[in-house]
Amino acid sequence: MIVTEPRSTATVVDSTTVVATHISEIIKRYAHELVGRQELQQLLDNVAASAPKVVEELIPNQLSLGALLRVVKSLLKEGVSIRDLRTVLETLADYTGLTKDPDVLTEFVRQGLGRFIVDQYKLEDDTLYLITLDREVEDIIAEAIQPSDQGNFLAIEPNSAQRIITRIRSMADRFGPSGAQPVLLASPAIRRHVRKLIERFVPHMAVLSHNEIPQNIKIQSLGVVSVNAG
C-alpha cells in the first residue's frame, strides 16, 4: 500500500500555463491523427540530413512509407514519443527481414524504445507499479486471436471480454486514489490485443510487455487480474 503525505500548500498556476498544458495534452492524445504521409516525409527528411544511410536502407527498399506510417501512428496512439525517430528506423531495419507486418514491427520498435516508454510511468527510484494478467486470462486472449488478410485480430467471446475488462478497470480504480500509476503487464504476443480490448473502457491505462521493461527497473506488483475473482 502506498501512503501519500497530505499537502499543506497549494500551487498556484496561471491561466496561460493551464491553457498551454491543456493544448499540449490534446495534441498528444490526437497526435496519431495529425501525422500523415506528408508530415512523416518531413520527419524522414530531417533524419536523412544527419543520417542518410538510416533512411536510404529502409525506405522504400525494405518498408513502404505507408507501412512506416502505420507503425508511427500505432506508437503515437499509445502515447509513445517518436522524437527518437532514428532508433525507430534502425529497429525497423533490423526486423523487416523477419516480417513486414506493421503491427508486429510496432512491437519490436516498442521493445527498442522500452526505456523511454517506462520512463513515463516509473517513480524516481525506478519503481514501476504493475497489474498483471494470470495465466488463464492470457490463454483466453491468446486463443481468441484470429488471422486475417489484414493481420491478426481479437475475436474474444463477449462475456469473457466483459469479465476481463471489468476486473482490470476495478483494479485500476482501486489504486488510483493511492497515488500510484499502475500499468498493465502482458506477454509480448498478446500485448497489442490487450490494449485494443481495454482502450475504450480503461483509456488511460498503459499496457506494456515483459520485453519493454529494462533490467534496472524495480517491479512492484499491485495485483493479478483473474476471471475467477470474486
Image (cartoon, grey):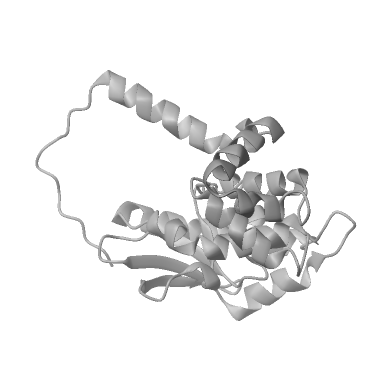
Residue at screen point 52% across, 45% down: 50
Examine the image and state in which quarter residue 182 appears.
bottom left
Q: Is residue 6 left or right of residue 88?
A: left
Q: Is residue 192 at all visible to an observer of this figure?
A: no
Q: Is residue 138 left or right of residue 111?
A: right
Residue lying at the far bottom of the rendered structure: 135
Residue at screen point 70% across, 48% down: 68
The answer to whether 176 is drawn above or below residue 189 in the figure is: above
Q: Nearer the viewer, residue 153 or 43?
A: 43
The answer to whether 52 is drawn above or below residue 219 in the figure is: above
| The N terminus sits in image quarter | bottom left
**Residue 127 placement (x, y as % from top left):** 32, 67
**Residue 131 placement (x, y as % from top left):** 47, 67
Q: Is residue 25 at all visible to an observer of this figure?
A: yes
Residue at screen point 77% across, 59% down: 101
Residue at screen point 55% across, 65% down: 111
Q: Is residue 135 left or right of residue 27?
A: right
**Residue 71 placement (x, y as % from top left):** 67, 50
Residue lying at the far top of the rendered structure: 15
**Residue 58 placement (x, y as % from top left):** 70, 54
The answer to whether 83 is drawn above or below residue 62 in the figure is: above
Q: Nearer the viewer, residue 139 or 45?
A: 45
Q: Nearer the viewer, residue 54 or 142?
A: 54
Examine the image and state in which quarter residue 34 appears.
top right
